[in-house]
Image (cartoon, rainbow, N blue to C red):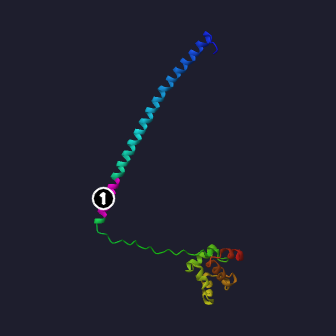
Amino acid sequence: MPAFTTNQWAILFLVLVLGWVLGLASRAGGGRWKRALAEEQEARAEAERGHREELSVAHARIKELEREAAARPAAAPVAAPVAPRAVRDDDLGIIRGIGPVGADRLGEQGVTRYRQIVALDAAGKADLERRLGAPEGTIDRDDWQGQAKLLDDGRLDDHARRYG
């Protein structure tokens, strides 16, 4: 076993004392954190107990209301008034040869749907042209009925391709 000098024994003693002091200093803080953790856990448990109590009161109130509702006679259901379905007019201004102004003028004459244009016979076409003040044969020349048929069928791409 090697022999220690006095200085070495003194240094060893000081290191041991320093370690002991540091251990005591760190131990005191650990107890504080443990107490804080215990207090927080207790506060959380108390809050959970409070929430459970509130929940049980709410469930009791729900059961009470359900019993009251079951005891009441059922009222006859009230039918909501049915509003008439609004019929949307077709956009006749898309048809080449009519445009927005012509669509307004057709609307004044009671023509608002593609189907009305498709359904026109020769006499109806002549009458409509006369009422609009359009030159005779305008409906046939601009193919209003063919365009209206495509638009009524929802074939907007075909209409755009053919009539621009």
In this rendered view, identify the residue nearer to me: 34 or 128. 34
The quarter of the displayed image where residue 2 is located: top right
At horizontal 61% and vertical 83% (from top left) the residue drawn is 118
Q: Quadrant of the N terminus?
A: top right
The quarter of the displayed image where residue 144 is located: bottom right
Instruction: Provide residue 84's location: percent of width, then percent of height.
Output: 46, 75
In this rendered view, identify the residue nearer to me: 77 or 3. 3
Instruction: Provide residue 73's location: percent of width, then percent of height.
Output: 29, 69
- Residue 126 drawn above or below residue 48: below
User: Relative to residue 127, is residue 63 drawn left or right?
Assistant: left
At horizontal 64% and vertical 83% (from top left) the residue drawn is 145
Q: Is residue 22 magenta?
A: no
Q: Is residue 68 magenta?
A: yes
At horizontal 45% and vertical 35% (from top left) the residue drawn is 37
Q: What is the secondary structure assignment of the residue under circle 1?
A: helix
Task: Please give the residue where the numbered disc 1 appears in the rendered image.
Answer: 64
The span picked out in magenta is 58-69
Q: Amino acid at mark 1?
A: Glu
> Main SS of the magenta segment?
helix
- Residue 56 drawn above or below residue 157: above
